[in-house]
């Protein structure tokens, strides 16, 4: 247990962004300018939204999407970081994580238009399978510019929120705060400890279509966790329920019975991207790749009217092996 200064004051901050809300719980010294911190946090998440949104026609991402092949596009440092990491994880995951699937997202009705699936666009996507984005996107990092060597509609929804959480924590730390917990939708990051010196406890959500509730709890010390799932955004086609997560190799939504994946990593951007990659890969490949990458992950698979948990790595294997009674104690005491 860590000892914390008794001078620290608890503050809970929040604001709207990206169609959801960000929040921050911090323990700061009495002379900390909390109003300035709250404003800085709002600027940090809004900057990510302004650069990387597919919902804003004038965002830097949409400017890159509209650029012709072979044309260099100058971009801000933040989106360059995200593109670079997206390409790296795309390569490491064998293309399972792909930042260039915006055409599939739109075709299946999950894009900004939020319409019904477009049969013509889906058929075209199936006929014209595009190469993995990490093979056709060229980044000139020193020059802060990017160009495409093939058709690609970039969509950073599987990594940008994680990066925004990292930016929030960097903002908090810039104010000299060492104990904080920041979140944006399903992406979370912890620094230091709570007031009593114990680690931050984070509930892992049960992948339930009807209601939200915890499946269990993990403890975080200076780490991030991100969750991807099939239970928040989906469409029903006949008797088939299809997730918003796209699989480039299929030319459409994933179809592997994975309900959700939670990943613990040092960076929330990495946790966010890998959670998406593991949703695509399924349990067998994901478990092997998570172990190879040194990641902790909890994969939850649907089967025979029940949920099957597949824990990988120290964050999940040890605490998740605890009895049901211990889990109830975690949940009841927070």
Image: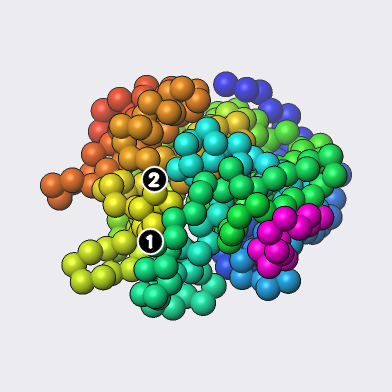
Q: Name the residue rendered at 74%, 50% in the picture.
A: 146
Whether residue 180 sits left or right of residue 153 in the image: it is right
Coloration of the structure image = rainbow
Foreground of the two, 150 or 287? 150
Residue visible at 79% across and 41% down in the picture: 141
What residue is pinned by disc 1? 126
Viewer-side label of 1, 2: 1
Is 271 left, or right, of 44 in this rendering?
left
159 or 181, which is in the foreground? 159
| Disc 1 to disc 2: CB gap under 8 Å | no
From the top left corner, tell me how far across and down residue 221 is, in percent. 58, 29
**Residue at screen point 26% across, 48% down:** 257
Q: Which residues are magenta?
A: 62-74
Q: Secondary structure at mark 1?
A: helix
**Where is residue 309 shown, x and y percent of the image?**
28, 36
Mark-to-mark CA distance, 1 and 2: 17 Å
At x 68%, y 59%, the residue is 69
Judging by the rendered image, the residue that carries numbered circle 2 is: 280
């Amino acid at each position: 247990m860590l000892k914390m200064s008794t001078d620290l004051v608890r503050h809970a901050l929040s604001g709207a962004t990206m169609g959801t809300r960000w929040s921050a719980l911090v323990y700061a010294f009495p002379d900390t300018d909390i109003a300035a911190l709250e404003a800085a946090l709002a600027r940090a998440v809004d900057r990510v939204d302004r650069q990387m949104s597919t919902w804003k026609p004038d965002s830097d991402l949409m400017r890159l999407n509209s650029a012709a092949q072979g044309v260099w596009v100058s971009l801000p440092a933040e989106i360059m970081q995200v593109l670079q990491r997206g390409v790296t994880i795309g390569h490491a995951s064998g293309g399972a994580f792909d930042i260039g699937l915006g055409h599939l997202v739109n075709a299946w009705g999950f894009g900004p238009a939020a319409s019904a699936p477009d049969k013509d666009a889906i058929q075209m996507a199936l006929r014209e399978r595009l190469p993995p984005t990490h093979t056709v996107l060229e980044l000139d990092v020193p020059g802060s510019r990017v160009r495409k060597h093939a058709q690609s509609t970039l969509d950073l929804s599987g990594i940008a929120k994680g990066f925004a959480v990292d930016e929030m924590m960097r903002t908090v730390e810039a104010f000299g705060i060492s104990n904080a917990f920041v979140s944006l939708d399903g992406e979370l990051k912890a620094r230091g400890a709570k007031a009593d010196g114990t680690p931050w406890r984070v509930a892992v959500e049960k992948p339930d279509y009807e209601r939200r509730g915890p499946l269990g709890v993990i403890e975080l010390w200076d780490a991030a966790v991100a969750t991807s799932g099939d239970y928040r955004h989906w469409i029903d086609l006949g008797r088939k329920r299809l997730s918003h997560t796209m699989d480039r190799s299929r030319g459409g939504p994933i179809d592997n019975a994975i309900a959700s994946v939670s990943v613990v990593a040092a960076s929330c951007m990495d946790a966010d991207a890998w959670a998406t990659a593991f949703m695509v890969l399924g349990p067998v490949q994901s478990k092997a790749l998570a172990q190879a990458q040194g990641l902790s992950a909890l994969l939850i698979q649907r089967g025979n009217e029940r949920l099957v948990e597949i824990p990988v790595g120290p964050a999940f294997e040890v605490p998740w092996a605890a009895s049901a009674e211990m889990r109830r104690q975690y949940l009841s005491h927070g």
